[in-house]
Amino acid sequence: MAYTIPSSCFQCGNCQPHCPTGAIQREGEEFWIEPGLCNGCDGYYSEPQCIVACPISSPVPLQAKKGRYKLNTRTATSPDLFPNGKNNSMASSIVIWEACNLLMQRSSLDWQTDLSGKLFYHKKVKQGRGSICFHIDENLDPEGDRQFNYATNISTIEGIDIRAACLHLIYAAYATSLEKPWEEEFAISDRQIEKYLGLDKRKDLNKAVKLTLIKDLAQQPCKLVTSIDWPQQGKVKQFSVPESYLWHLVEIKHHFQEDELGCKHLVGLTFKIKAGIWAKYFLNKQGSQTRTAFYQYGTLPKFLLTAVTSIWQQHEGAARMMLWLLFKIKMGKEQRITVPTLMRVAYGEERINQASTQREERKRLLRSFESDLEFLNHYGLKPVFDPVTYKEEIQPLWAKLAELPDDADEALEFWINDGSNKQRLTDSGPRDKWNLLMKARILGFDLPLEWEQQLAKWETKKQRKMRSKSKSKIKSALSAQQILSARKSRGISQRKLAQLTGKSQSWIRDLENGRLEAKPEDQLRLRQLLDL
C-alpha cells in the first residue's frame, strides 16, 4: 500500500533522495507521494525509507490503521528511571545547566555570529577564566558520517521546543547510571519517554501524533555541539574539550506493525544515546577519586517533567523558571534571587527592556510574572518573599490571600477586618510598583517534600564525606612530639633539617613547639626525611 505526506510535514525534503521508486515528487515548495509508484519499499528495504529518513516520521499509509498498536518484539532498553516513583539522580554540571538554558530560552539568549556567519552562544565561567560555547547542527543524521553543518539561523533556534529540555534532563539522568557514559550507550523507548513526560495520559493524542512528537523532541538535544575551555580548579588541571556533540544519537530504531494488506504502520521507536566527551571531565567517578576530573550530579524530580509538559504553552515563563531553579537550588535552597534575574530567565532581556519603556507591555509582563509565580507555588515551589524589598503591597494577590481561613465565618471576619484597614488586599499596587519590583528579592523557594528530602539526604552525605576527610587528615597529621623525637633519634639538628626541607630553622622550631602545623605536602617531605 502507498504512503502519503500529511499537512504536518514541514517540507525539509529529507525523504526524497531515499525513495527507491522515485515516488516522492516535488511541486513548488511542497512534496507529495505518487500512489502509483509507491509500494512501501517492498523488494528494496524491510522498512519504508520515507518514514525512517523523516525527522518526525511524517509520512503515513493512505489507509488509517485499524485496531490496537501491537508490537511483539522491541529492542531492549535501559531500566526505567524513577525506581522510587519520585526522583532520580542526574548529571548537573554547568555544561548540562547551560544546555538546558539554551533549550528553554532559545532566541532570548545573546546569540552571536562569527566571521563565517555561524551562530553561537558563548558563556563565560569561573569569573571569566574559562568558557563554554554552543552551536546547533541542524542536519542531524544518526546513520551518516555526522559532519558538522551549521546551517543555523534565528528561525531554527526559535523552532526549538521547550519540551526538548525535558529530554535533555532525561538523558542526563540516564548518564549517571553508567560507569563511563562517554563510552557506553543507553537505550530509551517511546513508551518510556511517553511515561516520563505524562503523554501516556493524553487521550486526545493518537499514537501516530505521539510518535511524531517524541521523535522530534528526542533529536533536538542531540543537535547541540559544545566546546569547553576550563581553568584549573583545585587539583583538577586545566583542560579543553574540542567541538563535539553534547549527546550522540547513535541510532533510531523504527518498529513497524504490518496489517492484513501488507502495509507497515510505525508503532514504536527506540533511541540509542551516548554522552559526549564532556562527560569524561564532568561525570567521571574514577577521575573524581584521583582528582583528575569531576563527578557532579543532582536530583531530577519526576513531577518537574510532567509539569513542564503540561504548562509550556499557557505558562512558558513558569516552565522556564522551573527548569532554571532545578539547577539553582542545587547550590542551596536559600538563594537571594532578584526579580529582574527571574524575569530574564522567564521572558528574556528584550521583553524586560520593552516593559521598562512601554506602559501596556509593563502591565502584561507584571500579570504574566505574578501568574507564573502562582503556578510555581501550585506545583510546590513556593517563593519566599523578602520582607524588606518585596513588601506585601507589591506581592501578588494570591500570596496575600494565603492566610485566608477555610472556615466561612472566619473568612467573613477576615474580609471585614481587611475592609476597615487603610490599605486593603484587593487594592491595586502602588504607582511605582514596577520600579519597586526591579529592586525586590526572593529569599528562596520552599520545595515539595520528596525533593527537599532528597536534597537534604545528599547534603548530609556530602557533609559526612567532608567530616571523614577532615578526620583522616587529623589522624595522619604529624604531631610536634613525633617530629622532635624522630629528628633527635637520627641525630639531625634543627638547622640541618631546615636545610633539607628548604625551610627556615624557626619554622622547624615552631613545628616542634606545636605553634603551627605543616601542610600536607610538607608533612610528606618530613616523613621521607625522618623515615616516618
Image: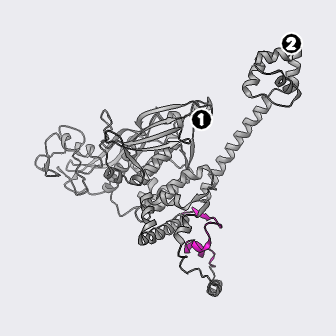
Where disc 1 sits, the SS reads loop
Q: Is residue 37 above or below residue 208?
A: above
What is the distance, in whole Å, between disc 1 and disc 2 at their CAs?
40 Å
- Count up the numbered dots: 2
List x then y, in percent, for residue 6: 22, 56
| Amino acid type of the residue that numbered disc 2 sits on in the rendered structure | Arg
**In the rendered structure, which segment of residues is drawn in magenta?**
379-404
Task: Answer yes or no: is residue 208 visible.
Answer: yes
List x then y, in percent, for residue 219: 36, 45
Residue at x 51% of width, y 54% of height: 324
List x then y, in percent, for residue 388: 65, 66
Residue at x 35% of width, y 46% of height: 269
Residue at x 30% of width, y 49% of height: 56
Foreground pick, 431 / 131 = 431
Single out the residue that lies furthest toward the top: 491
The residue beneath circle 1 is 233
Single out the residue that lies furthest toward the front: 357
Foreground pick, 48 / 138 = 138
Mark 1 Cα-neighbour bin, 10 Å: few <14, some 14–19, many ≥20: few
Q: Is residue 320 above or below residue 46?
A: below
The residue beneath circle 2 is 490
Foreground pick, 405 / 367 = 367
Q: Which mark is residue 21?
A: none
| Amino acid type of the residue that numbered disc 1 sits on in the rendered structure | Gln
Q: Magenta stretch containing residue 499, yes or no?
A: no
